[in-house]
Amino acid sequence: MSLNLLNFKNWRPPHLLFIKACSLMVVFFAVWSPPALSSEEFTLITLKVRVHLMQSASNKRLSTSLTEGGIKTIFEEVNRIWSQAGIRFELEGIDNLQALGIPEKRWYIKDRNWVKSAIPTGEFSASAIDVCYVKDMGPNGFFYGEPVVVCEKPDYHKVAGGCDNPVARVTAHELGHVLFLQHRQEWTNLMASGKNGISLNAQEIKDARKRALEILGRKPEA
C-alpha cells in the first residue's frame, strides 16, 4: 500500500505537447481513408448522360437559366473530377423540358418531392442517365431513382482543394449516388454533403467502377 502511495505522490502529468500529439494521431486515424489510385491505372469507362433544362411558366423556381454552353462547361469539370476513377460522362444530348403543371409548393411538402412531381418522364433516354437542372430548390441536388436533379444555385461550404464550379460539383456528387456511393463525413470527399470537396478513396473508386460496368451490362473487372 505504501509503495503504491509513493508512486502516486511522485507521479507527474505528461507534457501538454505529448497529449496534443496523441490527440492528433487519434483524429488522423479516425478520418483517414485509403488513398485513391492514379487514373492511369484504369481502363476508361464511358457512361452517357442526357441533360434536361427544366422550364415552367407558372413556377419560376423550376425554370433554369443554364444554357447549352453552360452545361458543356459543367460536364468538363464533372469529367475532370471523375477522371480519378477512370470514369467519363458523355453528353448524349441537351434539351429543354417543360415542367408539368402542378400546384404551388405547400410548406409540408418536401422540395425534392415537389420538384420530382413536376418532371415528365416520357422524354427520358432509354440509353443514358437523365439529369435535370432547375433554378432553385431546398437540397442542392438529389437522386432516388431517375432522374438526377441539380439546383443551379447550390448552398455549400468551401474546403481546401475543392471545386470552383459548385453546380459541377453537385452534379458529380449526385452521379456518385447513381454509382451507389453513399454520403461521407470527410469534408474534402466528393460524397460529403454541402461541401465542394472532390476526392475519392480507393474503395469508392472500386465500387463506382463496378456499378458503372453493371449499368453498361459488362463484366466486372478482375
Image (spheres, rainbow, N blue to C red):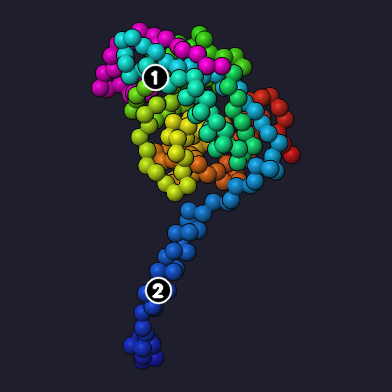
How many numbered discs, if any?
2
**Residue in the image at 66% along x and 24% along y:** 216
**Residue in the image at 45% along x and 20% along y:** 67
Foreground: disc 1 or disc 2: 1
Q: Is 133 rendered above or below residue 23?
A: above
The reply, left or right, for residue 110 in relation to residue 127 is left
Please identify the quarter of the rendering in which residue 222 is found.
Answer: top right
Q: Is 207 rendered above or below residue 58?
A: below
Give the residue pinned by disc 2.
17
Q: Position of residue 164 (x, y in %)?
A: 44, 39
Q: Is 34 rendered above or below residue 49?
A: below
Q: Which amino acid type is marked by label 1?
A: Thr
Q: Is 140 rendered above or below residue 56?
A: below
Q: Helix, strand, or loop for circle 2? A: helix
Q: Which mark is residue 64?
A: 1
**Front residue of this view, candidates 112 and 80:** 80
Q: Helix, strand, or loop for circle 1? A: loop
Q: Which residues lie in the magenta part?
A: 93-115
Q: Is residue 148 visible?
A: no
**Residue in the image at 45% along x and 17% along y:** 53
